[in-house]
Image (tube, rainbow, N blue to C red):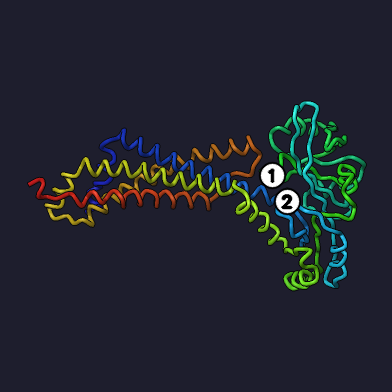
Amino acid sequence: MILKIPLAWLQLTRERIRLLVALSGIAFATILMFMQLGFRDALYDSAIKIHEQLHADLVLINPRSRALINMRNFSRRYLYQAASFEEVKSVSSLYIALANWQFAQDSYNRRILILGFEPKENIINIPEIIANLNKIKLPDVAFLDKASRPEFMPVIREIDQGKVVTPEIENRKIKIIGLFKVGASFGADATLITSDLNFLRIFPKRLVGEINLGLINLKPNAEVKKIQAKLQEILQPDIHVFTRQEFIAFEKSYWQNNTPIGFIFSLSAAMGFVVGIVIVYQVLYTDVTDHLAEYATLKAMGYTDIYLLGVVFQEALILSVLGYIPGFFISVILYNASKVGTSLPIAMTMTRGITVLILTIVMCCISGAIAVRKLSSADPADIF
């Protein structure tokens, strides 16, 4: 009978203005969930861009380090200890620090992340860097991430035109001679890569033997977990030994659990879910109230409560699907605009699309479940 008589659809389309308002509200809630989840995932994805480019099986860090933007120093001698293992093929050092970028056109400083490594070592899988290792060896030169925040676009355009840009970084003139692409992050406005010697020139107080990351590559067929356990036993508690994937998870954990940003985005998405429940509930409750006499008549004709509940849940399902569709396409447009405006890796994914669709359906079904309580008062005796 439900299929033969589309009662739910007819009730919704009878008041078209009300239907449009309801769909607008659901679309708004859907967009809010999409945007907050998108920004949250962009936060996590941007935070691990550098980690994903590192060429290493194992990573050594100071136990007091919290994230890439807050890496503590440790002695390089721990890396030499690791190099003594027969299964170790090579070890490399990476210097990391935040610095102030001062350009002539700017009235204030920009916060940038600087990476320094020995150019003879291929420890970063970035094609533009690998192809220009000899240039990075030159004094006071560096390469800039062309996916930095939009404020750096004038500089990036000049470098693209073959010009050499000379900003002041930590009060030292540095020549930016080339570009690479990794991506912006919440932790820094831009990323700069240079040689270890140039890094130490920018930070003259840094000791040569004090590094931030120790990168270890193992010989073929070496058991990563086994070597990790042996190293950790020897170096603890002074050093943490991570696999590359554990190092990525370590960074994600910081942004998820140690900063308010991830919590705020998740809370905002939850608020969108609650807003949607309230909007749909108001629509369904009003619809049930307006047609209470009709529902009572159907009861008198022999229709069961299950049938009437099915009608309300059909309305909820129709509203969820029709409201999701415009919300999805508007979110795609907003994602593209956000990507251009912030250079963050925000884009629609199938997983997120399906997740928000399920949340939208659940949101509307919860509203329907609350609204159907009104049907219990649809008593045929009140009509006849």
Dot 2 alpha-carbon crowd within 10 angstroms: few under 14, some 14 to 19, many 20 or more: many
- Which quarter of the figure has residue 202? top right
Q: As shown in the figure, which amino acid type bears the numbered disc 1? A: Gly
> The residue tagged with tag 2: helix, strand or loop?
loop
Q: Is residue 128 visible?
A: no
> Residue 165, how many percent across, how many down?
83, 32
- On the rendered image, what quadrant is the N terminus found in? bottom left
Q: Is residue 231 above or below residue 211?
A: below
Q: Mark on residue 105?
A: none
Is label 2 in contact with label 1 (beta carbons under 8 Å)? yes
Residue visible at 81% across and 54% down in the picture: 73
Give the farthest residue toward the right: 139
Residue visible at 48% across and 52% down in the picture: 355
Please indicate whether residue 120 sits to the left or right of residue 375 in the image.
right
Q: Earlier in the sequence, mark 2 or mark 1?
A: 2
> Residue 283, how many percent across, how many down?
31, 41
- Which quarter of the figure has residue 319? top left
Q: As shown in the figure, which amino acid type bears the numbered disc 2? A: Leu
Query: Where does label 1 land, which residue?
Result: 187
Please indicate whether residue 183 sits to the left or right of residue 171 in the image.
left
Query: Where does label 2 land, which residue?
Result: 68
- Which quarter of the figure has residue 322? top left
Q: Is residue 13 visible?
A: yes
